[in-house]
Amino acid sequence: MTSSARDDAPLIEVSGRTFHPAWLRYSCPCVRCRHPESFQKVSDLSARPDLPEAAGVELDTEANELRIDWREEPAHRSCYPLDWLLLHSADTSDAQNGPVAAPWDAATLRDRGVRWHEAADCGTDGGPWFTDLQTVGFALLKGLTPHGLERLLSGLAPVFYTEYGRQADVRAVPGAEDLAETESALPAHTDYPYKVTGPLTQFCYYAENQATGGELFLVDGFRAAEDFRREHPRWFDLLTGTPVGFEQLYTTWRYLYRVRRPIISLDGNGAIDALHLGHSHAWAWEIAPERCGDFYRAYHGFVRQLGERRYHWSHRYADGECVVFRNNRILHGRDAFDPRTGVRHLITAYVPWQQLESRVRFHQEQRLYLLGQEQK
Ligand SMILES: [Zn+2]
């Protein structure tokens, strides 16, 4: 395929970053191209016979903007705030989009240290607990009340509702619909591997924790899976390349959930994106007989790896303590407990993880939208 002459249009350089004229024209933030109130795009250049051409380019460092006059009828001028350009440049790494994940195992977490946040000081517009969620994948809150939990959920709404409602009381009950509602130990898992949902911010709030046992542990699944990739590359490929089904039968609500997907999913760049794993929801997997031997060896290898103490961070949560974490990255499990020794009242609730990221991004970038607004 030959590239047309227009594809060889000279790139425009700003502060060491390069931009293609077509990209710039399509990204024009002016009020004719982008609705001034909703900021949504209204221009549609697809009907034009060819890509746009810049007639004049002016970099005004005083006004902190790049101005381009386009060769088109009627005349069109685009003004780009330099901050905005640099933030959206193709060379800009994700590092500019907030704190970077810092995968951990028990030893690195011990060196780093964990910190507790007073729940009353935790807002829903950012702050240190958000930073913990973005770096180590979990945040520890103390002094939380049911009202305080509600404040956090409302602040990050809409809440992800489940069959149990806006939040769930997790206690050992007769007629359990889920193993979580028994006193059994639970191995490391992600919640809802059988539902189609993006990653969730999960709250595990101990309203009361008097029963003996039941310690909760966390595992950084990204770290464990990265080690697994290095130590067992062939097994890792089997887990990322073989969709398997996780399911849940809800008798009360008349649903039989089943979702098929790989246990470890990768993003377009091959980075570990999410884990979907709940041993108690694994059932009859549709794997070709000739692939079963290899697959089950790989699966058992990964489950063993997640069970290794070198990945576990455990804590005995007191009344009013809460751990918030990113489901699909941080796996959790618990020891068995004895419900006859005291009340264990755990409340779980979820909001989509995307809301936390979007809130952070809103505060970082909102002003750039308003900058575009000022330029008529
Ligand atoms: Zn425009």
Image (tube, helix red, strand yellow):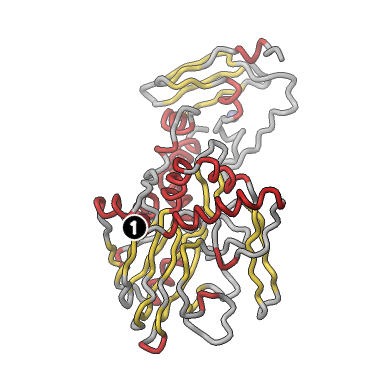
Residue 188 location, x and y as percent? 46, 62
Q: How many marks?
A: 1
- Classify 10 Å Cα crowding around label 1: few (below 14), some (14-19), many (20 and above): many
Residue tagged by mark 1?
129
Q: In this view, which residue lies farthest toward the top?
A: 5
Looking at the rendering, which quadrant does residue 106 occupy? Answer: bottom left
Tell me the kind of residue under disc 1.
Trp
Q: Quadrant of residue 308?
A: bottom left
User: Which residue is pictured at 48% across the width and 40% down the height?
Assistant: 369
Q: Nearer the viewer, residue 125 or 231?
A: 231
- Quadrant in which ligand 1 is drawn: top right
The percent coordinates of residue 376 (x first, y second) are 52, 33
Q: Does 93 sit left or right of 313 as displayed?
A: right
> Quick check: 112 left or right of 353?
left
Please determine whether, in this image, residue 282 is positioned above or below residue 77.
below
Of residue 321 and residue 294, the one placed in the foreground of this image is 294
On the image, the x and y values in percent for residue 100 come to: 38, 43
Identified at 41% across, 32% down, the residue is: 83
Does residue 286 appear anywhere in the picture? yes
Residue at the (36%, 52%) spot, across then down: 136
